[in-house]
Amino acid sequence: MPDLFKPPLITIIIATLNSEKVILNCLESINKQKYKRYEIIVADGGSTDKTLNICQKYNCTIIKNKFKTAEAGKAIGLKNSNGKYVAIIDSDNILPTSNWLSQMIKPLEDDNTLIGSEPWEFTYRKNSGFIERYSALIGANDPYTFIIGISDRKNIINNQWTSLKLMQKEFKTYLKIKLEPNKLIPTIGANGTVFRTNFIKPNFTSNYLFDIDIISQKLNSTNQPLYFAKTKNSIIHTWCESSVSKFYRKQTRRLKDYYQYKNIRSFDYKTKYIQNNFKFIFYVISIIPMLITTIRGYYKKPDIAWAFHPLACIITLYCYLYVSILYLLGFSVTQSRTNWRQ
């Protein structure tokens, strides 16, 4: 007979590949949680550094991820999950408070219509790398999503977690939002997103779990609205720290992976947002809008990290155009994970 007073089990899924520089802080922040009923599944793509040694010290269940990518790691983690909830944590995430897990599942325990929860902002740390601070300020890792208005974390300029017009009901510790079929939705799904396991695991057979497609797939298949919680807390995403080369590498990987796996994805977001693609191109090549955003941002929150905004946009546009042209000309855009490092 089940123990009605036993807290629900949370499966924490972390995909790794040579993540020794970031995984220790991630696991240590999980270890400090007051909520102790969790399991950690690390899906590793073949790390040759100290990643696995570190994970073993934190009693992680380590599963081999032969496909190497984070999306494949999340899929195999989900298939082996035992919890009522699955928390998708990236290896470069850090839980900022000891009650983070409790905060994330509370809305789901209180309201069974909610399919999942996600922090409404990235933690801003004034002594962190300038690219990490920049991402926290705009509420996005990719300036593209910030500019076209589909990002899913609060930005400092308008203090909104998304620019999309969504029905929202405010509660003390979270917002209950309504996501509807055939409408644009924010890029919900990564960096600390928690889902009900019975929402995504039943009938899941794919070798890849594309986190930002999870909700879109369900909306398209059922044609019914879904309800989601944006919790009034944050998560740290170290992202690229202060490395411009890492930012370039990750932006390039983002689109290469999109083209490589587009035929098996449930949601072609680049096609759906085609008008917004032109909006982003105009925003960058006309230069002035980028400078206005930089000035507005600095006025709201003075930080030299805002100076990275024009460069981030230019790098992103270059990566997207370069990889797209390669793909359209028939060249391989397969992203190699050989020697990949976090």
Image (tube, rainbow, N blue to C red):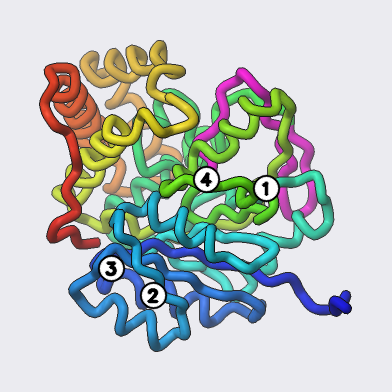
Give the magenta-colored segment's residue range.
168-189
Question: How many residues crowd around disc 3 within 10 Å: few (fewer than 14), some, or many (20 or more)?
Answer: many
**Which x, y percent locates residue 251?**
25, 40
In the depicted structure, whether residue 26 falls above or below residue 270: below
Q: Which residue is mark 1?
A: 199
Kindly identify the amino acid type of the residue bearing the numbered disc 1: Phe
Identify the residue at horizontal 29%, vertical 57% (top origin): 68
Q: Which mark is residue 38?
A: none
N-term mark: 3 or 1: 3
Q: Say which amino acid is labelled 3.
A: Ser
Give the structural element (helix, strand or loop) at label 2: helix
Disc 2 marks which amino acid? Asn
The answer to which of 93 and 286 lies nearer the viewer is 93
Residue projecting furthest to the bottom:
57
In the image, taking residue 138 as reference, residue 97 lies left or right, namely right
Quarter-of-image position of residue 276: top left
Q: Secondary structure at mark 4?
A: loop
Residue at mark 2: 25
Q: On the image, numbered disc 4 is attached to which residue?
A: 189
Q: Residues within 10 Å of mark 1 (few under 14, many from 20)?
A: some
